[in-house]
Structures are given as structure tokens and as C-alpha cells.
Amino acid sequence: MIAALLSRLARVQFTVAYAAVLLAISCAILALGPHAHDVIVQRASTNVHNLAHGHLGTLLGSALVVDAGPLYFWLPFLTCLLALAELHLSTIRLMVAFLVGHIGATLVVAAALAGAVEFGWLPLSITRASDVGMSYGALAVLGAMTAAMPQRWRPAWVGWWMAVGLTSAIIGGDFTDAGHTVAVILGVLVSARFRQPIHWTPVRCLMLAASSGFGFLVLAHHWGTMAAAPVFGLVGAFAAYKLTNFVTARRSVPVLPAAVGDALTGPEPVATG
């Protein structure tokens, strides 16, 4: 029995290890008190100030410090998402998707903020804003799950998350909202390199539903966004599905050689006069 349990845990080793580290660090920060919490968050943040001063370790450390609501809510859903991705994509692919999304989105957001401050569009104080957590990596993993979707529904899946992400970024208006959208896009792009047979079971379908709900709440965490995102998400999913079908149908239409075309249409009439 123990051997069977260990064998199953070995299939989701990254998920188990990462969840355990997050649990330990979150409990330790909670025990240290509010002041220690603020200091740790500030030092682990991947803001422009820290990155500009060479604190590149925050690119990884920030994924280990979560400052987003109660632990008992987000950790089970995060674990569900990562476990599902690890079962379908493999441990290495999960790690690649998570790191590409987390680091890539962080650097894109930092570069955009630095440019905005340089041109005077944003105040200098934005360079010290706290930016920690697992949300970029988690959303990139959700985007990478595109590779696990049935081929027929893949465009709708991508269209939904792209539309929800863009809606959240526009309505939310915060740099983290933009980072979330970038992370989803990076995950979808990474998924183009992931191809393997997919076996869905009822339990994994339930895990996908829970993971998708978690991803939606991370993206649309404002009341206004929660109301608008589903509408635009459905529009995006429908448009992507129809567009893909149209392009596929156009490509499948055979092109007749000129000789065959002439034979079908017959000879051109000869003018007489």
C-alpha cells in the first residue's frame, strides 16, 4: 500500500514538493508576524527597484512567497492544477511552462513599468510595488494545458482564456493583471511544443473544472471583471472555434489542375462572324 502511494506521488513529484515548500514558508511567515511578512514580501518582490539593483534571485524566490488570500483556499486549487498538468504534460514540461510563465511575465511587466516610469507615465513609487506569488506560473501552466485539450476544442479553449485575460487586463488596469495575461499567452505558446497521447478520466475532468475555476478567479479578481470576463470569454471561444473551422475548411478544398478544369468546363466558345 505504501509502495503504491509512493509510486503515485512520484508521478506528481514537482507538485508535491512545491506545495510543501509553499505551505512551510507561508506558515513560517504567518508565525513571524505582520512586520516580518512585510519585510519578506518587499525583499522577495520582483519589482523594478529590486531587479535594477541586481537582485535576480527574486525571479525564483518570488514564486515561493504568496501574499494572496487565505492559504486554505488557494493551495488546494493550485495543487490540483499542477498535479493535473504534471500527469498530462510530465514533470519536465510542467516545470518549463511554470518557469517560462513566471520569469517571462515578470520580465515583461518589469520592462513595461520601467519604460512607463522613464517616460513619466507612472510615478516612481511603482518601482517599489510588491510583486510576489505563484499566479504568473500557475496561469502559464493553465495556458500550457492547451496541449492536453482534444484537438477539436483546442481553439475554443485558447480563445476563452485569451479573451478573459485581455478583458481582465483592460478592466483591472493593474500591472499584475497585465502580467497574468502575458503569463497565459506564454503558456499557450509553450504548449505548441507539447504533443503526446491524452487520456481523460472523470476524475481528471473534475480536476480540470476546479483548475479552470481557480484560474478564472486569479484572472478576474475584481467584481467588474467577473461580470464582463465570461461574456467576452464566450465570444472569444466562439470566434476562435469558428475561425479555425473556416480556415480548416478552406485548406481542405482541393485545387483542380488547369487541364482538369478545362476538361470540366469544356472548350471556350469560338466567336463566329
Image (cartoon, rainbow, N blue to C red):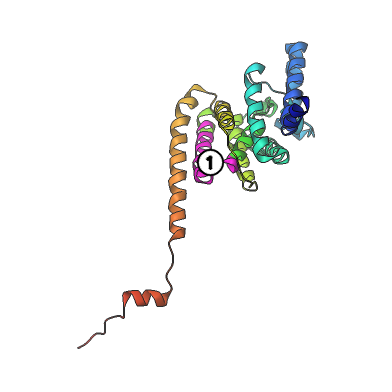
Quarter occupied by the C terminus:
bottom left
Q: Main secondary structure of the magenta part?
A: helix
Instruction: In this rendered view, identify the residue nearer to me: 73 or 200.
Output: 200
Can you identify the residue that label 1 sits on? 158
Decide: is 32 above or below 265.
above
Position of 152 compared to 270: left or right? right
* Residues packed near mark 1 inside 10 Å, few (<14), some (14 to 19) or many (20 plus): many
The extreme front residue here reads 1
16 relative position to 197: left or right: right
Q: Is residue 16 above or below residue 199?
A: above
The x, y position of residue 212, in whole percent, is 56, 30
Q: Is residue 153 left or right of residue 23?
A: left
Percent across and percent down for residue 61 are 76, 29
- The image quarter containing residue 100 is top right
Taking the spot 62% from the left edge, 18% from the top edge, the residue there is 73
The answer to which quarter of the image holds residue 213 is top right
Q: Is residue 21 visible?
A: yes
The part of the chain drawn in magenta is 146-168
Which residue is rendered at x = 60% and y = 35% of the image? 142
Residue 77's spot in the image, x, y percent? 62, 24
Whether 172 is among the magenta residues is: no
How far from the left and from the top, in percent, is residue 53?
78, 33
